[in-house]
Amino acid sequence: MRVRRSSFFAACVFTAAAVALLAGCGSPPAQRSTEEALAEVALESALDGRNAEFVSLVAPSFLEDARRQMPDADDEVLGKVLISGFLEGVPFEGIVDATYFVEVEGDRAVVHVWGTFRDSGGAETDLPETDAVRIPLINEGGRWYLDLLDL
């Protein structure tokens, strides 16, 4: 029996596509909330020492007061100061696999973060949900920011 190549090829492509679809390939990734994404970027920028980026994530109302108290500080210096306070209760130095849980109440939110992280020696360490890091957020002008007044 002779099989036409184009029919055989089409059957193979169809089978591969069906298997990929059933396996979840081609599905859009799960949507992350804005609050969750902000908490992740805040942690990463703080842990990596990206001071100016961290400053851009802080609530404008807080920054206004901070700049009044430190009028000569640029974003690099201000970011370093703000990061030191932000990381005070964070028991890790790198993210391996984190879980984020968001609680929103009006214009305030709290993101709880737990999972597997790297300690100061580079070893992986697990942080259970009961010890989750708390990252407070505030919505100002329709956008979410870090609420450093609620640390």
Image (tube, grey):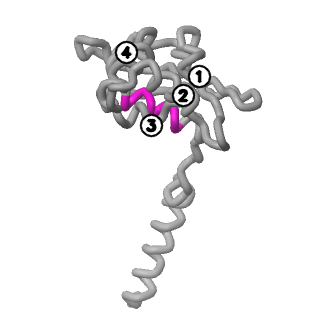
Residue under the image location 40 percent in, 31 percent down: 54
Residue range in magenta is 37-45
Tell whether label 3 touches label 2 (CB within 8 Å).
Answer: no
Report the residue marked by disc 2. 146
Of marks 2 and 3, which one's residue comes earlier in the chain? 3
Image disc number at residue 84 = 4
Report the residue marked by disc 3. 56
Element on which disc 4 rests: helix
Number of other residues with Cα within 10 Å of mark 3, as a class: few under 14, some 14 to 19, many 20 or more: some
Element on which disc 1 rests: strand
Image position, residue 110 (x, y; %): 63, 23
Rendered position, 138 above or below 29: above
Number of other residues with Cα within 10 Å of mark 4, as a class: few under 14, some 14 to 19, many 20 or more: few
- Looking at the picture, which amino acid does disc 1 mark? Pro
Q: Residue 11: within the magenta?
A: no
Disc 1 to disc 2, C-alpha distance: 6 Å
Tell whether label 2 touches label 1 (CB within 8 Å).
Answer: yes
Of marks 1 and 3, which one's residue comes earlier in the chain? 3
Tell whether label 3 touches label 1 (CB within 8 Å).
Answer: no
Q: Nearer the viewer, residue 129 or 102?
A: 102
Q: Residue furthest right?
A: 106
Of marks 2 and 4, which one's residue comes earlier in the chain? 4
Element on which disc 3 rests: loop
- Identify the main secondary structure in magenta: helix
Q: Residue 40: within the magenta?
A: yes
